[in-house]
Amino acid sequence: MGRRNSEVGKTLAMAGNGERVGMVVSPYPAPELVRQYTEIQPDAADRILKIVEKEQEADHALTKREETHEFVLKAMGIVAATILCLAALGGGVFLIVRGAVASGWASIVGALVVVITTIAAGGKK
């Protein structure tokens, strides 16, 4: 859903003549890049790895929150649909008891058609 794409760790493998051979995508930067940073700042490798690990932890936490949110929304939708269907069925029975047989049956059949088509569709988007 809302994943962020980090540019860290995208490395193009180049052949001697400059042709692109392949691409490696990793949360970690290329070893050559880390060595270059370490030449400038001795503790750069440790700092880079800590940053990457924190980013990965944050990404996992975000994914977990999104999955939980999606589950709650689906559960709320199912509960709301069940309540509406039961209300339509109850209203249909009430109308039949009150003498409005055609309207009562229309309400009952309408509710059942919605339930059956939803089940038949299998939750397809």
Image (cartoon, helix red, strand yellow):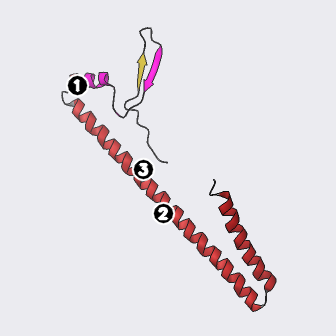
At which x and y percent is residue 55?
A: 34, 42
Q: Which residue is mark 3?
A: 63
The mark lying in front, picked from 3 and 1, is: 3
Relative to 114, 11 lies left or right? left
The magenta segment: 17-36
Residue 21 numbered mark, or none:
none
Q: Which residue is mark 2?
A: 72
Q: Earlier in the sequence, mark 3 or mark 1?
A: 1
Residue at image coords 47%, 17% = 20
Residue at image coords 20%, 27% = 41
Quarter residue 36 falls in: top left
Quarter residue 48 falls in: top left
Depth order, front residue of 35/40: 35
CA gap between label 3 and label 2 equals 14 Å
Tell me the kind of residue under disc 3: Thr
CA gap between label 3 and label 1 equals 32 Å
Tell me the kind of residue under disc 1: Thr
Relative to 117, 42 lies left or right? left
Secondary element under disc 1, as helix, strand or loop, is: helix
Secondary element under disc 3, as helix, strand or loop, is: helix
Q: Is residue 21 magenta?
A: yes
Q: Earlier in the sequence, mark 3 or mark 2?
A: 3
At which x and y percent is residue 4?
A: 43, 42
Q: Which residue is mark 1?
A: 38
Q: Is residue 65 magenta?
A: no
Depth order, front residue of 78/33: 78
